[in-house]
């Protein structure tokens, strides 16, 4: 009964496209400056807010951990990735633990028209996005001339084109509703040239530059823009990119939950660029002092190993 009331209230907070979310928040009885409101029930208090968060690459790793954090803060979620069963399992977990209203959209975001298709699906479901988390991404260890070009083009589409296109499609409405923002997941790789992983590093350099520029463009609006730059993190990324045996990962990787928590908190504070972990912070700082011809040699040293064919790429 009480849960039903909570759900009714949640549904009544779901603002259809065209309605004003800020009015909705005020009507719900909360302070419109404070996105987090609490349902008055006799049950343990369920936090709610009026924002909907779209997370790309929510089926595992950092994206999955970010989904848990946004759900715990009372946000509604739109989870996007290719693996339907993993997304459905996460949805069930978020519903059980946080009563989070959660939509699952199964989509390959490396396809040419992925951003438009995703926007159309969001509108078809009468959803609205307040926070866009551009997290989906992958890398591939190996020499540029040897990695299949299809894989590298997919990487550019997923890590760069979809990030920019989706942001461009959703931003005008976000500006209209004046809440939320954009959390982009780049990498410590964004600060360096990346021999043996040239395209991946270049895509992340794009994300960092794009994000930092947007942060400044939107500084006088109510929107936040944060670029999260993790170092090696324990997720599916290392196996997917063929990096498990590199010095970089063998030297120790951070927990995805820890990385997500720092990213989430930094986004709430509207920090423009967040490098995670002492070693990575030091590295990012040193890149400012190190000539590029030295930087690229350093990177080549820390990520030798074998590519998928077993070729030593030192
Ligand atoms: N782990 C690290 O060491 C590290 C370090 C720095 C930056 N990052 C960045 O962190 C972000 C998240 O990666 P992660 O470490 O959490 O790795 P992960 O566990 O492999 O997660 C990657 C996510 O992206 C999704 N994805 C991959 N290809 C996709 C596609 N074509 N269409 C839609 N979704 C796709 C995956 O879902 P499906 O397979 O279900 O589609 C998965 O949910 C990436 O942008 C990565 O570059 C990772």
Image (cartoon, helix red, strand yellow):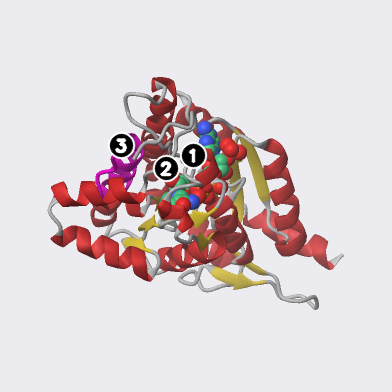
Label 3 Cα crowd, 10 Å radius (few <14 / some 14-19 / many 20+): some
The earlier-in-sequence mark between 1 and 2 is 1
Give the side of residue 168 with respect to residue 129, left or right: left
- Label 1: element kind: loop
Q: Is mark 2 within 8 Å of ligand 1?
A: no
Residue at image point 61% right, 54% down: 76
Query: Residue at position x 70%, y 57% from top?
Result: 94
Residue drawn at 80 percent across, 75 percent down: 43
Q: Which residue is mark 2?
A: 305
Gap in angstroms between the C-alphas marked 3 and 1: 14 Å
Q: Is mark 1 within 8 Å of ligand 1?
A: no
The span shown in magenta is 192-209
The image's mark for residue 198 is: 3
Task: Give residue 291's position: percent from left, percent from top.
Answer: 12, 53
- Label 1–label 2 contact, CB within 8 A: yes
Residue 295: x, y in percent? Answer: 20, 51
The front one of 80 and 233 is: 233
State the separation of the CA atoms marked 1 and 2: 9 Å
């Amino acid at each position: 009964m009480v849960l039903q009331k909570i759900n009714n209230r949640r549904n009544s907070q779901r603002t259809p496209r065209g309605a004003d979310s800020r009015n909705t928040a005020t009507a719900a009885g909360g302070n419109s400056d404070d996105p987090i409101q609490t349902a008055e029930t006799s049950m343990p208090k369920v936090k709610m807010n009026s924002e909907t968060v779209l997370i790309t690459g929510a089926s595992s790793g950092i994206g999955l951990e970010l989904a848990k954090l946004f759900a715990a803060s009372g946000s509604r979620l739109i989870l996007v990735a290719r693996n339907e069963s993993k997304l459905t399992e996460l949805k069930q977990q978020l519903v059980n633990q946080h009563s989070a209203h959660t939509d699952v959209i199964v989509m390959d975001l490396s396809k040419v028209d992925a951003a438009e298709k995703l926007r159309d699906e969001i509108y078809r479901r009468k959803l609205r996005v307040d926070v866009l988390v551009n997290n989906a991404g992958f890398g591939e260890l190996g020499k540029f001339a040897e990695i299949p070009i299809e894989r590298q083009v997919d990487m550019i589409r997923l890590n760069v084109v979809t990030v920019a296109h989706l942001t461009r499609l959703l931003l005008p409405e976000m500006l209209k509703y004046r809440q939320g923002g954009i959390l982009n997941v780049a990498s410590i790789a964004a600060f360096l040239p990346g021999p043996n992983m040239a395209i991946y590093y270049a895509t992340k350099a794009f994300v960092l530059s794009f994000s930092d520029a947007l942060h400044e463009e939107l500084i006088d609006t109510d929107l936040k823009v944060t670029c999260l730059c993790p170092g090696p993190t324990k997720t599916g990324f290392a196996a997917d990119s063929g990096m498990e045996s590199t010095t970089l990962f063998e030297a120790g990787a951070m927990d995805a939950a820890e990385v997500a928590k720092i990213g989430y908190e930094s986004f709430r504070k509207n920090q423009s660029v967040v490098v995670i972990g002492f070693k990575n912070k030091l590295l990012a700082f040193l890149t400012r002092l190190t000539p590029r011809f030295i930087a690229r040699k350093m990177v080549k040293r820390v990520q030798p190993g074998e590519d998928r064919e077993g070729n030593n790429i030192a």
